[in-house]
Image (spheres, helix red, strand yellow):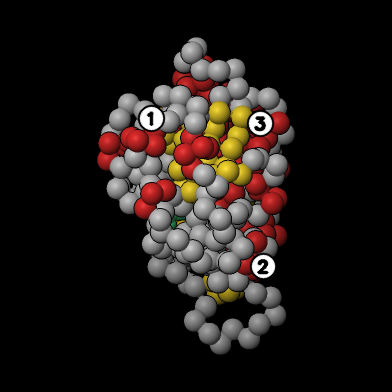
Amino acid sequence: MTNFLSLADVTDLDALIQSGLDAKANPFASQHLGKNKTIGLIFFNSSLRTRLSTQKAAQNLGMNVMIMNVGQDSWGLEMEEGVLMNGDKAEHIREAAAVIGRYCNIIGIRAFAELQDRDKDYREQVMHQFAKYARVPIVNLESATRHPLQSLADCITIEEVRRADVSLPKRPKVVLTWLPHFKPLPQAVGNSFSEWMNARAQAGQIEFVITHPEGYELATEFAGTAPVIYNQQEAFDGADFIYGKNWSSYTQYGQVLTQDPSWAVTMEHMNRTNNGKFMHCLPVRRNLKVSDAVLDSPQSLVIEQAANREWSAQAVLKEILTSL
Ligand code: AN0
Ligand code: CP
């Protein structure tokens, strides 16, 4: 693996999931692999889990870690080519990425969608500019359209539960549900989760269903052929895993079309499932998107899911380090 930008960079998903589970069982087995290697973690946006879990994973592999918040710690970075830089951005990505690439063996980047211009966001300019000018492997720490380290942690979490619970069906039913929120959020987590779950469904591992109000359709490149059910209750029937996430509209780009509170997940919703587990990438606003009762119930996987971010990052970094 050179870059880890999306599922397309994964050659063997089963092996990567297993590598994450192996890292969880034995975190320091490869502690010499990253000796004298440096990872730079570059954040254009806030983070709790991604920042700490990726740092921890890199340290488990013996790497040195440098972290920078763009704009706060560094200069603002211009991404457009051939522009007159007379605005508020003091440095161009050409120099910035090239310089960071000289200090680091791997660079992780978080840069959310701006939700203003759909074509611009879906072009993934920040990831591609870094990949072009840094000349070292790039890891996506959540880009405009994807969050693959989260999706890998989600796969690890589902696999872990599947192995532990023999009563689960051979192909558990996984439901991605939209949740209400007053703020426009990116589609990245929903996109990525769909992309990875569609791959799992195609491999015969799970059944995958998407539910959201009309107008919240994800781009077809991500939704794939998963059934979309506009009736949330119907979608929840017999589900083994409920994965909640808010996203803003893709078709009416970046808009909040509804905040219908009936879409927030409560115990009543969960009672329609097959004693299903509740998943969310976090951060989550309690009682706006999902009730206290669900988050605090034994059905909630959110903390284990966040814990598994360490092992997803470790599996990815291990594979990149091996290819250096
Ligand atoms: C971000 C998002 O929705 O993409 C990050 C999630 C991991 N969430 C918020 O901005 C609240
Ligand atoms: N799930 C996730 O990526 O969380 P952070 O935004 O806190 O990194």
Q: Which residue corresponds to mark 2? A: 119
Residue 12 visible somewhere in the drawing: no
**269 or 37, which lies in front?**
269
**Sequence-earlier tag: 3 or 2:** 2
**Sequence-earlier tag: 1 or 3:** 3
Q: Amino acid at mark 3?
A: Ala
Q: Secondary structure at mark 3?
A: helix
**109 or 184, which lies in front?**
184
Does the residue tagged 1 have its C-beta within 8 Å of any atom of ligand 2?
Answer: no
Residue density around tag 1, few if under 14, some if 14–19, many if 20 or more, within 10 Å: some
**Sequence-earlier tag: 2 or 1:** 2
Image x and y of residue 302, in percent:
39, 36
Above or below 91: residue 200: above
Looking at the rendered image, the quarter that the C terminus falls into is top right
Number of marks present in the image shown: 3
Q: Secondary structure at mark 2?
A: helix
Image x and y of residue 281, in percent:
44, 43
Q: Which residue corresponds to mark 1? A: 271
Q: Amino acid at mark 2?
A: Asp
**15 or 178, which lies in front?**
178
Image x and y of residue 170, in percent:
59, 17
Instruction: Look at 46% across and 52% down and name the residue there.
Output: 246
Q: Which residue corresponds to mark 3? A: 201
Does the residue tagged 2 have its C-beta within 8 Å of any atom of ligand 1?
Answer: no
Q: Secondary structure at mark 1?
A: loop
